Amino acid sequence: MQLMLAPLHGITNHLFRNCLNRHVGSLDAAVTPFLAAVEDAQLNVRKWTDIRPENNVGLEVIPQLMGNRPEAMVDTVRALQGMGYRRINWNIGCPSAQVVRKQRGCGIMPHPDRVEAVAHAVSSQTDCAFSVKMRLGWQSPAEGMEIVERLNAYPLDFIAIHPRLGVQEYTGTPDLPALRLLLDRCRHRVVYSGDVVDLPSYEAIATAFPNLHAVMLGRGILKNIFLAEEIHAGHTIPQDIKRQRFSNFYHDLSDTVATARGKHGALSTLKELWHYFATFVGMSDDELRELLRITDFSDFEQNAGKYLDN
Ligand SMILES: Cc1cc2nc3c(=O)[nH]c(=O)nc-3n(C[C@H](O)[C@H](O)[C@H](O)COP(=O)(O)O)c2cc1C
């Protein structure tokens, strides 16, 4: 079973991906956080720092697009192919209100004709290996079922499924019985995404769904950057070794982000990450709140350093 890094907008950008790959590895590919699909006239590929090939050496990257207009999707797919990408993913699972309101992300799931129009346009007008990342539906699993059946007619690379409804956002638990019904109807390779946080949760999914093509690691790998390595090894790495390696990873990451974004930009990126790293270093909620209140980069790094091993 392959392991992929899940896209987390604002978090799993190339700086994070490369740092993770330098210190841990063990991932077969990463789907990037979404880029907006636009028509040729609005395309500005120079703005796509995150997916520039020179920024993505060493880990296979699958750019993800957000959009709902077939022409915009085709134009953007072609631009990505021009940059050398063959595999491209389409986000129809994002539950954010402002995305859904525009019938993008999960907001397109109640409109299977629109989903099919994009799949048809991309598969008939380009030769990319197109994939879709979806939820069970926006309001009902019947929506996902309809989409899976429609997509069976198109040559997709894979369908990634996060088995929650859009209206749930991140609450509740993945609905595995509903996922099973979807898999029974799906003729494409399936990638699972959702709540894999440790070896037991990985093994539960891999055992329940042995035919999956891959499992995506998202919030779980942020809370334990060694998750993919542990899954491959089949056992956990001793905590003292992990803490030392995590410190090295963190110092590299904060230097890299500060160099690329400046200290102010780095502060907001690192604060986002510490919501997850706090779990790894065993920080209490109060300690995390205290850290996140700091507004000066050097003070922040000094305080964060107290939770690292060197
Ligand atoms: C902060 C955040 C940002 C996300 N951004 C994206 C995104 O850009 N594209 C996407 O397809 N999914 C996105 N997701 C969903 C994740 O890729 C993943 O499917 C979901 O978090 C469930 O998996 P997990 O429990 O392993 O995190 C995001 C999730 C979070 C929490």
Image: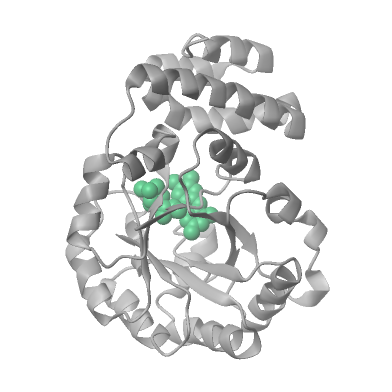
Residue that protrudes farthest toward the front in the picture: 233
Locate residue 89, reporting x and y percent: 54, 67
Q: Is residue 54 left or right of residue 268?
A: right
Evaluate whether residue 239 shows in this view: yes
Evaluate whether residue 284 shows in this view: no
Locate residue 33, reporting x and y percent: 57, 54
Q: Quadrant of residue 258?
A: top right
Locate residue 24, reporting x and y percent: 49, 36
Q: Is residue 90 left or right of residue 163?
A: right
How many numbered discs? 0
Residue at x-position 75% and y-position 66%:
83
- Please identify the quadrant where the N terminus is shown: bottom left
Residue at x-position 31% and y-position 65%:
212
Question: Relative to residue 9, is residue 81 depicted above or below?
Answer: below
Q: Quadrant of residue 37?
A: bottom right
Residue at x-position 44% and y-position 81%:
111
Q: Is residue 176 left or right of residue 115?
A: left
Coloring scheme used: one colour
Locate residue 299, reporting x and y percent: 63, 10
Q: Quadrant of residue 140?
A: bottom left
Residue at x-position 70% and y-position 72%:
81
